[in-house]
Image (cartoon, grey):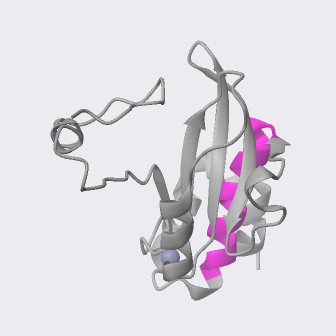
């Protein structure tokens, strides 16, 4: 039996399709995003991404939340809005380790630049504990766009 598919923009791999065609006593879950350090590859947080098409802002997330708790890292649900290929903005809800308001809580609306700032903030926050600081600094100094980002200024100019 093929399990119900309820996301419009998901393209399943051949393995995923095969798995979903098996009996009902197995389960399978994809992790959409493991945000990791650009230098040492340490996982920083998990993100469950959802294409936003004016549906209700709720999304099953038990496995992502549990996995984040087990790993001791945060997890988020991120609804993204597009027009054509252009990213228009996000709704974000933190689901681990703290989960204010629980399942029915309202996500925060963020612009694309606010979410980008958050991604940069998480990379910068990790930097003092990074095992490959020299590599990150090298990459940062070589990337003119990254060098201009505010979150990285304390790393570049300390
Ligand atoms: Zn690192």
Task: Measuring from the top left, give residue 58's x and y in whole percent.
Answer: 68, 42
Residue 2 found in image quarter: top left
Residue name at image x 31 percent, y 53 percent: 28
Residue name at image x 66 percent, y 38 percent: 79
Residue name at image x 38 percent, y 51 percent: 30
Residue 9, magenta (yes or no): no
Front-most of residues 143 and 5: 5
Residue 116, magenta (yes or no): yes
Q: Quadrant of the C terminus?
A: bottom right
Task: Measuring from the top left, give residue 76's x and y in whole percent.
Answer: 64, 57
Compared with 63, 3 (above or below) is above
Front-most of residues 100 and 117: 100
Left or right for 29, reference 73: left
How many numbered marks are there? 0
Residue name at image x 63 percent, y 70 percent: 74
Task: Measuring from the top left, give residue 31's x and y in whole percent.
Answer: 42, 54
Q: Quadrant of the N terminus?
A: top left
Residue 133 visible somewhere in the drawing: no
Front-most of residues 158 and 5: 5
Residue 100 found in image quarter: bottom right
Where are the magenta residues, as a range?
110-127
Front-most of residues 55 and 137: 55
Residue 73 found in image quarter: bottom right
Residue 21 visible somewhere in the drawing: yes
Task: Measuring from the top left, give residue 125's x and y in whole percent.
Answer: 69, 75
């Amino acid at each position: 039996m093929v399990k119900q598919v309820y996301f419009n923009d998901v393209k399943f791999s051949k393995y995923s399709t095969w798995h979903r065609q098996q009996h009902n006593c197995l389960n399978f879950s994809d992790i959409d995003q493991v945000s990791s350090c650009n230098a040492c590859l340490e996982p920083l947080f998990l993100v469950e991404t959802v294409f936003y098409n004016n549906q209700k802002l709720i999304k099953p997330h038990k496995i992502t939340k549990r996995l984040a708790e087990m790993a001791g890292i945060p997890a988020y649900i991120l609804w993204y809005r597009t027009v054509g290929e252009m990213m228009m903005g996000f709704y974000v809800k933190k689901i681990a380790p703290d989960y204010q308001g629980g399942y029915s809580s309202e996500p925060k609306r963020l612009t694309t630049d606010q979410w980008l700032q958050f991604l940069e903030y998480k990379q910068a926050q990790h930097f003092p504990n990074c095992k490959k600081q020299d590599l990150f600094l090298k990459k940062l100094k070589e990337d003119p766009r990254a060098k201009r980002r505010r979150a990285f200024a304390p790393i570049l100019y300390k």
